[in-house]
Image (cartoon, rainbow, N blue to C red):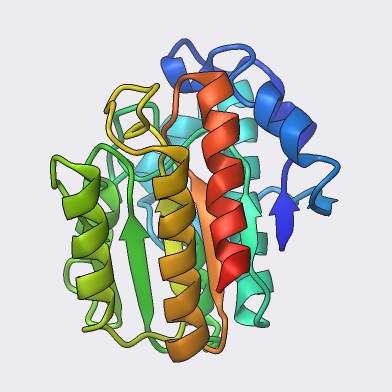
Amino acid sequence: MKIYFHRDFLKHYAYDPAAEPGRLDPALDLLKDKYPFYEPRPAVEEEILLVHTPRHWRSIAEDDLLHHTALLAAGAALEAAETAAGGEHAFALCRPPGHHASSDSCWGFCYFNNIAVAVSSLLDRGLISSALIVDFDLHFGDGTANIFRRNEAVTFWHCRESSSMLFLDALENDLALYEADIVAVSAGFDRGVDDWGGMLSRKDYRRIGSLLAGFARQKCGGRLFATLEGGYNPQALARNIEAFLQGLEEA
């Protein structure tokens, strides 16, 4: 398991809940001695334009600090994806999140669609021919769904079940129906019992990780990566990320 993280993810870059000071500090403190950390490169314009329009690129580039951090987040997803394509799990501990960014617009604290950029890069380079994107954030990843809605190579999964049992059952049952070369996970932790959704426990996040890793082992040669999306209680976010990563290692 490799974790991609840059110290600039700890800095202020915008006025929104995803950019709140201290959001990632507890996760860094909890994980830094348990997993190898790698500093990502920033994404470049050509990679962003795999999924976003030039107009959208220019709109984000108007804010130098935001642009810098958003490129680093996309870069972390790209490097996590490349690691996963080689058969090793990887996690992008990054911000800003990305799953509400469509090709020519964005909202919900997102700017570039990190996971879409990463999956599109793998497809464009011929490293994979299909992908399953699992988004377990509280909020529907409309940007990701929009970007891939006409792309038969990509399957997008999100669940709106209102209890942990139904959610986990839906994930397990649906995974049995899918085939893919890689699993890409939009890992949002705002469904947590101590976060906005008030639903999923640490045990549930560990189970999610185990289910996804099991699918990756059986169907994808172990190819799986995840990028951070939501999660706004810093202490709970740290514990839930740890549980998810532990689940990935169980399968």
Can residue 49 be seen in this snapshot?
A: no
Figure check: 195 above or below 56: above
- In the image, 19 versus 62, the foreground residue is 19
**Image spot of residue 76 (x, y percent):** 65, 51
Q: Quadrant of residue 221?
A: bottom right
Locate residue 146: give its quadrant. bottom left
Please provide percent x and percent y for residue 241.
Answer: 56, 42
Q: Quadrant of the N terminus?
A: bottom right
Residue drawn at x 33%, y 54% is 135
Q: Position of residue 85 (x, y in %)?
A: 61, 79
Q: How many marks?
A: 0
Q: Does residue 231 appear left or right of residue 101 in this picture?
A: right
Residue at 60% across, 32% down: 238
Q: How far from the left and from the top, in percent, is residue 46?
A: 55, 61
In terms of image quadrants, where is residue 5? top right
Please state if 202 lies on the left or on the right of 28 as rendered.
left
Decide which of 163, 117 is in the foreground and name it: 163
Does residue 134 appear anywhere in the picture? yes
Give 223 or 125, whichever is nearer the viewer: 223
User: At x 26% / y 83%, what residue is drawn?
Assistant: 178
Q: Is residue 144 left or right of residue 233?
A: left
Residue at (22% x, 82% y) in the render: 152
Is residue 84 shown above or below 46? below
- Relative to 171, residue 32 above or below: above
